[in-house]
Image (cartoon, grey):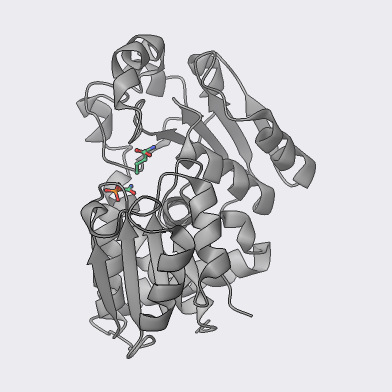
Amino acid sequence: MKKDFLEITDFTTEELWETLELAKKIKDEVKSGKFIPRLADKTMSMVFAKPSARTRVSFEIGMVQLGGYALYLSPNDIGIGKREAVKDIARVLSGYNDIIMARLFDHKHMEEMAKYATVPVINGLTDYNHPCQVMADIMTVWEHRGNLDNLKVVFVGDGNNVANSWINLACRLPMHFVISTPCGYEPEQWLLDKAKNAGLSTVEAIADPLEAVKNADVIYADVWTSMGQEEEKAKRLSDFAEFQINAEMLSHAKPDCKIMHCLPAHRGEEITDEVLDGPNSIVFDEAENRMHAQKAIISFLFGITK
Ligand code: CP
Ligand code: NVA
């Protein structure tokens, strides 16, 4: 049976740790100048219905570093769900490639892609979630702290796709996860309940961001207006005004609190230059780790764990 990676919870806790260990190993190898061709002769199609910098480059270069090949298909190439049905392109690409990575709008399309593809499918972001991002995020936290013990992560801003993958991560790894959003931008209650009922983590929604970030080990930012929501931008700028991550907010967290952002950042909106470029920020390690985490995810889907 092929395995897909559409959400963090597609992996068990043990599988997540195995993947994180492999990611660290692969990163160490690369840093010492070793490129082990774990994916020699494997090919990947990358289907993008939305723009990307990190996801495209990190998957493409990651495949090359592992001895494979990745092909970029831009938003204009396939016209997924419009020019061609998802289930048709899933079967066509399965005939050409060993694995598919896709960035789509509708998460149902991602599930349909995985259902009809006969090769593994990796989710490179949908309107619902962004699991590869959060794998890189937790790898980065682990790398910086040396462990994930007694971890408090506070996501400040929109209850969006990245937040949803963090909530799914809290179903698998123990943490204190707090989300602070303006009224009307909370994550779905069923998802918060799922994480609470998983019984590993404390999961809370706290409306006041300054209250939420108390004792935070990590404050996490994302844009207030995600791809596809551009028409709502003016309203969102005003609704999120109190949720900017700035020096005043940071002063309410632990002194060594790490600042994370999946990027791209809208500097001066959800986060100030001072904080993004400041000593607490680990955003560029986080961005780099996309590549190492994803190489481990791909390897894992091919049954390679070492
Ligand atoms: N963080 C992230 O997924 O970046 P891109 O949208 O540039 O791929
Ligand atoms: N929430 C953002 C994440 C970008 C990586 C978006 O969907 O646009």
Looking at the image, residue 120 sits to the left or right of residue 64; the answer is right
Q: Quadrant of residue 26?
A: bottom left
Q: Is residue 192 left or right of residue 211?
A: right
Q: Residue 288, position in %: x, y?
A: 29, 58
Q: Position of residue 7 (x, y in %)?
A: 56, 55
Q: Can residue 288 be seen in the rendering of this structure?
A: no
Q: Residue 197 is drawn in which quadrant?
A: top right
Asked whether, in this view, residue 201 is left or right of residue 66, the answer is right
Viewer-proximal residue, 107 or 251? Answer: 107
In this picture, is 25 found above or below 199? below
Picture layout, residue 262 above or below residue 36: above
Residue displayed at 51% across by 41% down = 128
Describe residue 193's horizontal placement relative to residue 30 as left or right: right
- The residue positioned 40% from the left and 56% from the top of the image is 124
From the viewer's perspective, is residue 179 above or below residue 176?
above
Which residue is depicted at the point 42% across and 56% down?
136
Position of residue 251 measured from the top left corner of the image (x, y, whole percent): 40, 20
Q: How many marks?
A: 0
The residue lying at 46 percent from left, 19 percent from top is 252
Q: Is residue 122 visible?
A: yes
Q: Nearer the viewer, residue 39 or 242?
A: 39
In this view, the residue in front, 167 or 279, is 167
- Which of the image's four quarters has the N terminus? bottom right
Q: Position of residue 140 (x, y in %)?
A: 41, 54
